[in-house]
């Protein structure tokens, strides 16, 4: 059984959600059959979206610091509890000598396996701007429908003013309208392309066909940890 190292803290609730989904995805009947996890809940990692937009410091130094701590602690491979942070993965890899499982690849593989041809992308403006999902979906013959430039803030607001602010009374009328508009454009399902969007779906009881990137990463991590 390999030990999973989780680069977390982006945000803390999303990190806990990933841990919970790893536990749920593990076919265990007793404590000793669960997968060892090392978690660095590094809340000092600067905001990834602001860094990509040139409005804040780079998260790379803290990401590398966390990755090195996990490697030193005995992690056999790493996963990152943040979609947007994957943009900086090429800057992290030279500093470590263990594999990293991509949340982007895990989510897209699930979409392809389910046979969806057109999906909506719910992610931070940072992730949207990097094209991480759009490129991978296109390579797999899947159309990606993103919010328009003047509606993307609705997703960002739900993440920052809703989940990150632990606002249980957040007004979801705008996000529900956005989901309906994207369905009208042909979205057969929605990628929850930010690790805090699945938290939002649960917090605010949003309805739809969702591909939970956190859950897909959890399943991929369990499979890798249990592989020979």
Image (cartoon, rainbow, N blue to C red):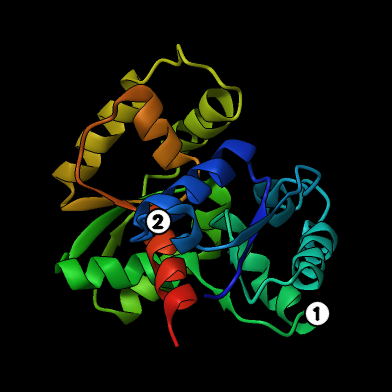
Residue bearing the label numbered 1: 95
Pointer 2 or 1: first along the chain: 1
Position of residue 7 measured from the top left corner of the image (x, y, whole percent): 67, 58
Q: Point out the residue furthest to the bottom here.
A: 228
Query: Which residue is nearer to you in this view: 142 or 207?
Result: 207
Position of residue 107 measured from the top left corner of the image (x, y, whole percent): 36, 64
Residue bearing the label numbered 2: 213
- Residue 53 higher or lower than 89, as above or below: above
Name the element at disc 1. Answer: helix
Question: Which class describes the residues within 10 Å of circle 2: few (<14), some (14-19), or many (20+)?
Answer: many
Answer yes or no: is residue 207 visible. Answer: yes
Question: Are the residues at dot 2 and dot 1 in contact (C-beta closer than 8 Å)?
Answer: no
Query: Which residue is nearer to you in this view: 200 or 13?
Result: 13
Where, by quadrant of the figure, is residue 82 drawn? Answer: bottom right
Answer yes or no: is residue 150 visible. Answer: no
Position of the C terminus, as image quadrant, is bottom left
* Residue at figure coordinates x 20%, y 61% from the top left: 118
- Tell me: 71 left or right of 4: right
Position of residue 47 measured from the top left corner of the image (x, y, whole percent): 72, 45
- Tell me: 20 left or right of 38: left
* Residue at figure coordinates x 37%, y 50% from the top left: 24
- Residue 46 higher or lower than 102, as above or below: above
């Amino acid at each position: 059984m390999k030990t999973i190292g989780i680069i977390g803290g982006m945000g803390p609730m999303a990190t806990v959600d990933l841990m919970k989904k790893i536990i749920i995805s593990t076919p265990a009947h007793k404590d000793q059959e669960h997968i060892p996890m090392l978690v660095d809940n590094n809340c000092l990692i600067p905001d990834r979206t602001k860094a990509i937009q040139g409005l804040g410091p780079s998260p790379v130094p803290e990401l590398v610091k966390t990755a090195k701590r996990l490697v030193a602690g005995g992690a056999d491979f790493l996963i990152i509890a943040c979609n947007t942070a994957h943009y900086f993965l090429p800057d992290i890899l030279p500093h470590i000598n263990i594999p990293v499982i991509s949340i982007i690849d895990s989510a897209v593989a699930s979409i392809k396996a389910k046979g969806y041809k057109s999906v909506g992308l719910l992610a931070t403006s940072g992730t949207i701007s990097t094209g991480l999902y759009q490129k991978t979906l296109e390579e797999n013959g899947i159309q990606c429908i993103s919010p328009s430039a003047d509606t993307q803030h609705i997703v960002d607001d739900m993440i920052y003013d809703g989940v990150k602010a632990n606002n249980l009374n957040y007004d979801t009328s705008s996000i529900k309208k956005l989901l309906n508009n994207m369905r009208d454009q042909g979205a057969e399902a929605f990628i929850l392309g930010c690790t805090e969007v699945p938290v939002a779906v649960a917090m605010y009881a949003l309805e739809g066909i969702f591909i939970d990137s956190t859950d897909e990463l959890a399943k991929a991590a369990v499979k890798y940890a249990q592989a020979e």
